[in-house]
Image (cartoon, rainbow, N blue to C red):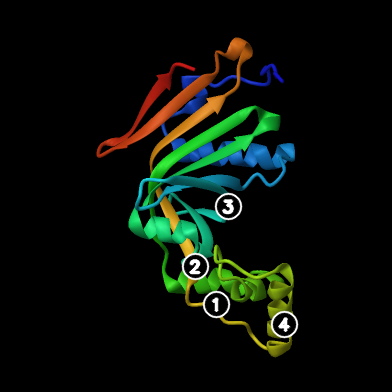
Amino acid sequence: MRKLYTRSVLSEETAGSDPLKLFSLWFSEAKEEGEAEPNAMSLATVDKTGQPSVRIVLLKGLIRDEFQFFTNYDSDKGKDIAENNHVALNFFWPKLERQIRIEGQATRISKEESETYFAVRPRESQIGAHTSNQSSVVPSREFLEEKFAKLTKEWEGKEIPKPENWGGYSVSPTKIEFWQGRVGRLHDRISFERLESGWKRSRLSP
């Protein structure tokens, strides 16, 4: 299983000096290309024992130059972040033969911001947030479906409140690396590291 990467190149000139501008450009191109869920990103966390874990979450915005996503604060990832807020994100867009790696610190956003986003979620997703005690053991699929149906009936015609243990995180990036696949596995890798004076750009060996 081997694919030749011939789609594009990444030079220092096209990378520029601002990684957040480059991210926005690449993200827009991923949407235009028709990548499946271009906002899907891997989120890696580490628990208090040092055990890493990774899962896919959805980017919901680049707000104040930070990467924002939402989840249950009592989930495994929420517990990990409470113990150690150093996280990593990864985007992979195979059609464009591109990858972006991000390292940074995750912090909770305000309750008000979380409520604003929760209010515009699909109603089924709102009920689902109340149905699921994320990452906890359940007896069966039927248990979840029955709870979902019960809550759907209870809130019929009513506004659904945001669960207290549900909300958003913002990841403030300290390092962002852009990867462009190239021929012969001589991939372009350009990394940006945040310093007090601004972003430091470096080219990495593939």
Q: Are marks 2 and 3 in contact (CB under 8 Å)?
A: no
Residue at the far top in the pictured view: 184
Element at label 4: helix
Q: Mark 2 packing: few (<14 Cα in 10 Å), some, or many (20+)?
A: many
Q: Earlier in the sequence, mark 2 or mark 1?
A: 1
Identify residue type, mark 2. Gly
Q: Quadrant of the N terminus?
A: top right
Residue marked by disc 2: 167
Inspect the image, locate mark 1, and give the three-letter code of the amino acid beneath it.
Lys
Residue type indicated by callout 3: Val
Q: Determine the CA span between mark 2 and mark 3.
A: 13 Å
Relative to 10, is 137 above or below? below
The Cα–Cα distance between marks 4 and 1, rounded to whole angstroms, is 15 Å
**3D distance between C-alphas at marks 3 and 1:** 19 Å
N-terminal of the pair, mark 3 or mark 1, is 3
Residue contact at pointers 3 and 1, CB within 8 angstroms? no
Which mark, residue 152? 4
Q: Residues within 10 Å of mark 1 (few under 14, many from 20)?
A: some
Q: Nearer the viewer, mark 4 or mark 1?
A: 4
Give residue 175's mark.
none
Earlier residue among tags 4 and 1: 4
Name the residue: 65% across, 37% down. 29
What residue sits right under mark 1 in the picture? 162
Mark found first going from the N terminus, 4 or 3: 3
